[in-house]
Image (cartoon, helix red, strand yellow):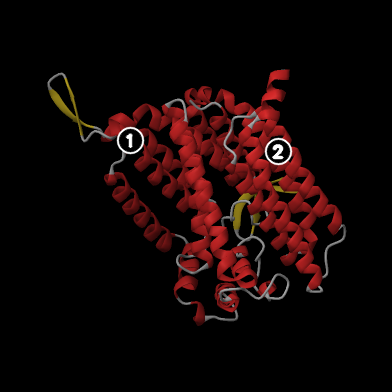
């Protein structure tokens, strides 16, 4: 780190735009605190400290990016932080006892983002470790199955010093490193329907074998861990990344067929998958039992209307585990259609920002790494929002930057940092 880095950061137009955009996060969380107090909501102990810590973390993250990534795009951090402001406000509203934990994880996530942005200058080196990343992902899943902690019927966590760490979140980092490296090497081959070599014609399908074997191992491990959501997320991101890399619709069609076959197999092979699908299709069969959570979510969305009940004035607490699984339904109830659409648009903007970074990257690996990161966050958001709206069965994954959960916040901020690192070293 040199004095030039500091002076470049101070003069950076992108960082100045980012600072202006960060004002939206500060305004939102200040207004949210005021709205909760006006609604006579019982704020958690140390609510002023929570608010101050969030604002300080936002500024420290911005200052760090001025030093380590002065040329990086201005939008990703600002969008992620605004989503986190929504998350802190609604986690406080839904479960005040964990509000301090949530803002602590936001602060740690911002630190992880700055670290990842700094390390982003070395991203081309990751290409050589694509199969190491794939092996690490599968090994971590197996270790979780053997040594992990079971919570709510799924063995997805390790307990460390009294804290639970969801290891499947870390898998996302390994996933994008493997996908980007694999596709950077093989995309041109996969995009060709036939290859000619030595006067003979060959199909490109054998080049899919490493990807298919990795997918098979990961899906099998996730199925044994009872993690339906991560399987859907993994397959959808692979499908989207294959299309971005090759432009071939056959991978989309084939991938969706594979996803459908996997879903049908899971429905008949695993009782928990069967139960989730049945609740999705027939929630009124057991409205006070298995269908209660899904029905309360729909009632909350309907009650919100266009303008919402008002922050602190609705009844989102009637939805079990709303702060983790159904936070979007709570947002729709208290902020209405306008607030819900606003949150969706933030994810769309983050996706477009990530794809723009991909277009400006200096090499194929950077383009595929940035696009995979952007697609991963966007697909995860789409899956959980669709589950909250009963478009698809619920999956148990978190809404990025918004839902309560430290592992998710850390990894998603690290992914944003990776985007910023790639952007800082664009063409």
Q: Which residue is drawn at 51% across and 64% down?
A: 387
Residue 395 image label: none
Find the residue positioned furthest to the left. 199
State which tag comes first along the sequence, 1 or 2: 2
Tell me the SS state at disc 2.
helix
Give the residue drawn at x 76%, y 43%: 57
Q: Image quadrant of residue 205? A: top left
Q: Is residue 197 above or below residue 402?
A: above
Q: Which of 300 and 27 is in front in this view?
A: 27
Identify the residue position indicated by label 1 in the image: 208
Do the CB atoms of the residues marked 1 and 2 lie less than 8 Å apart? no
In the rendered structure, the answer to whether residue 288 lies left or right of residue 257 reads right
Q: Position of residue 237 (x, y in %)?
A: 44, 46
Q: Is residue 361 left or right of residue 399?
A: left
Nearest to the observer: residue 106 or residue 259: 106
Q: From the viewer's perspective, is residue 113 above or below residue 383?
A: above
**What percent of the width, then of the height, locates residue 122?**
57, 23
Q: Residue 62 carries which label?
A: 2
In the rendered image, the quadrant that contains the N terminus is top right
Left of 28 or right of it: where is 346?
Answer: left
The foreground one among 157 and 353 is 353
Q: For marks 1 and 2, give the CA distance.
A: 41 Å
Badge 1 element:
helix
Residue depicted at x 70% and y 41%: 110
For residue 245, which quarter of the picture?
Answer: top left
């Amino acid at each position: 780190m040199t004095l030039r880095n500091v002076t470049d950061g101070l003069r950076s137009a992108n960082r100045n735009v980012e600072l202006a955009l960060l004002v939206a996060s500060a305004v939102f969380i200040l207004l949210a605190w005021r709205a909760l107090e006006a609604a006579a909501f019982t704020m958690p102990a140390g609510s002023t400290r929570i608010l101050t810590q969030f604002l300080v973390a936002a500024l420290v993250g911005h200052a760090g990016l001025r030093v380590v990534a002065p040329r990086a795009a201005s939008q990703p951090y600002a969008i992620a932080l605004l989503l986190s402001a929504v998350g802190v406000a609604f986690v406080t509203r839904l479960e005040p006892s964990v509000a301090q934990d949530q803002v602590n994880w936001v602060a740690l996530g911002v630190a992880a983002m700055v670290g990842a942005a700094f390390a982003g200058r070395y991203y081309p080196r990751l290409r050589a470790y694509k199969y190491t990343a794939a092996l690490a992902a599968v090994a971590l899943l197996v270790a979780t199955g053997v040594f992990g902690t079971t919570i709510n019927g799924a063995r997805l966590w390790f307990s460390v010093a009294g804290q639970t760490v969801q290891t499947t979140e870390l898998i996302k980092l390994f996933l994008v490193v493997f996908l980007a490296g694999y596709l950077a090497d093989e995309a041109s081959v996969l995009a060709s329907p036939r290859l000619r070599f030595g006067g003979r014609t060959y199909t490109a399908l054998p080049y899919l074998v490493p990807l298919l074997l990795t997918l098979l191992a990961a899906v099998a491990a996730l199925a044994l861990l009872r993690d339906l959501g991560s399987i859907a997320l993994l397959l959808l991101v692979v499908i989207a990344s294959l299309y971005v890399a090759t432009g071939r619709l056959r991978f989309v069609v084939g991938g969706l067929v594979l996803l459908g076959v996997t879903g049908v197999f899971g429905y008949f092979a695993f009782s928990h998958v069967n139960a989730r699908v049945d609740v999705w299709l027939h929630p009124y069969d057991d409205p006070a039992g298995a269908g209660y959570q899904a029905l309360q979510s729909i009632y909350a969305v309907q009650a919100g209307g266009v303008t919402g009940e008002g922050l602190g004035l609705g009844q989102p607490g009637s939805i079990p585990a709303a702060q983790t699984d159904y936070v979007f339904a709570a947002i729709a109830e208290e902020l209405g259609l306008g607030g819900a659409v606003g949150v969706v648009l933030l994810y769309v903007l983050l996706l477009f920002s990530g794809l723009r970074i991909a277009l400006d990257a200096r090499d194929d690996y950077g383009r595929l790494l940035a696009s995979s990161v952007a697609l991963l966050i966007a697909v995860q958001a789409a899956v959980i929002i669709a589950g909250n709206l009963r478009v698809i069965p619920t999956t148990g994954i978190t809404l990025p930057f918004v839902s309560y959960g430290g592992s998710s916040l850390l990894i998603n901020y690290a992914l944003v940092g990776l985007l910023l690192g790639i952007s800082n070293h664009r063409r």
